[in-house]
Amino acid sequence: MTILVTGGAGFIGANFVLDWLAQGGERVVNLDKLTYAGNLETLASLQGDARHVFVQGDIGDTALVARLLAEHQPRAVLNFAAESHVDRSIHSPEDFIQTNIVGTFRLLERVRTHWGSLPEQDKAAFRLLHVSTDEVYGSLGAGDAAFAETHRYEPNSPYSASKAASNHLVRAYHHTYGLPVLTTNCSNNYGPYHFPEKLIPLMIVNALAGKLLPVYGDGMQVRDWLYVKDHCSAIRRVLEAGRPGEVYNVGGWNEKPNLEIVHTVCALLDELRPHADGQPYASQLSHVKDRPGHDRRYAIDAGKIERELGWRPAETFASGIRKTVQWYLANPEWVAHVQSGAYRDWVQKQYTAQDALQ
Ligand code: NAD
Ligand code: TYD
């Protein structure tokens, strides 16, 4: 048995692949374009492991996707591939439209054709799981109820609009063609191998480098944080027991304003790697110009996945953020290679003929 994972060299996809194989999951074909966010160094521990087949390519490459489906006959496709950074989507939305909308559409088309050709038993067992975000629901006011699956869509950034469009396409492929799809909308993730352009890794990396910690606006925007490995366990559970056509919201019941996150990171660094001169890391904090159209609050109501599938996060925010800071302190090479761009040479340097890019 095989699963096809797309975007499996990115932050969440790579954590998923590592956890999946560590837990004895079946073979993974990992299709990733290796944009700036794709980092094969994250998957270095899988070098030589026959259960991981890496393929560099685009989810929008219909010939390639058709070939992979025919050749490997996966029982499921898990779509993590996306452009994922809101700030980048504000500066240059085009890639977000191409990958998140057009790419997902083309992937759906190829998967639909493949699925249609399967024998009845395999057809019934097949799943396409689309990994998405709470940002499709827009922004909450301070007293509003958290996002349930039935919340209206009101995406505010080019990123969230492109993800919303992809969710609609996935839904339509179930409604129109009967494709057995599952969609997860998750809150903000954090944890190991997170690209240091996102809030938590950026703050850790900047703090250690003695740089400013740029807090957008007043820093009172609220996000709902989930440790990445808990997101991965939710995806495994949805794949295993989710009902085709259903949406599951995934979150950790951990709403926190950004300022509190930054202060927590600083306090952990003060404890684990204090500055030689005794200065607290929080002295590097700096309020900068706000993000245009900045969503004020996200919060996930994870009641459905808890009730129907019995999923619960294993980490509290306190345990997850400590693990995360410890991971960054223990892995300065990974960070340095990301910052210098050297991670991009990893493909050429580290991948042998055995795991050759196909
Ligand atoms: P990421 O940016 O770290 O990784 C994305 C990966 O997709 C990269 O490896 C990249 O090379 C690959 N990719 C991009 N375009 C591609 C294409 N056209 N074809 C094949 N591969 C392509 O993103 P992430 O944080 O790991 O997010 C993964 C998924 O989870 C995304 O769909 C995102 O919308 C969703 N999500 C993320 C968060 C979060 O907090 N990071 C929260 C909820 C949902
Ligand atoms: P981010 O990690 O980009 O995730 P998202 O925008 O998808 O929620 O940002 C999380 C929050 O942190 C968001 O409110 C923007 C804020 N932020 C800062 O204040 N400073 C920063 O340097 C970054 C990257 C984000």
Image (cartoon, rainbow, N blue to C red):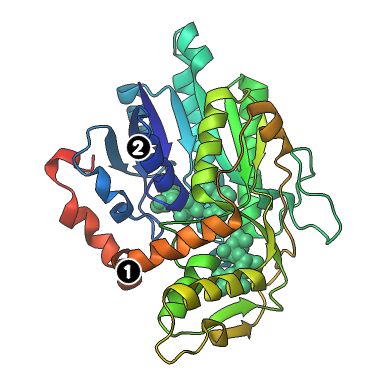
Q: The disc labelled 2 sits on which kind of residue?
A: Ala
Query: Which of the marked residues, 1 or 2, is nearer the chain's N terminus?
Result: 2
Is residue 30 visible to the viewer in this orientation of the structure?
Answer: yes
Q: CA distance from mark 1 to mark 2?
A: 23 Å
Residue behind label 1 places its C-beta within 8 angstroms of ligand 1: no
**Which residue occupies the foreground of this view, 158 or 270?**
270
On the rendered image, what quadrant is the C terminus found in?
top left
Residue 208, percent from left and from top: 42, 78
State left or right for residue 63 relative to residue 298.
left
On the rendered image, what quadrant is the N terminus found in?
top left
Q: Which residue is mark 1?
A: 332
**Which residue occupies the foreground of this view, 144 or 282?**
282
Q: Tell me which residue sits at (30%, 52%) in the image.
A: 40
Residue 176, percent from left and from top: 66, 22
> Which quadrant does ligand 2 occupy?
bottom right
Q: Secondary structure at mark 2?
A: helix
Q: Which residue is mark 2?
A: 22
Q: Is residue 350 above or below residue 165?
A: below
Q: Is residue 124 above or below residue 108?
A: above
Residue 268, percent from left and from top: 51, 71
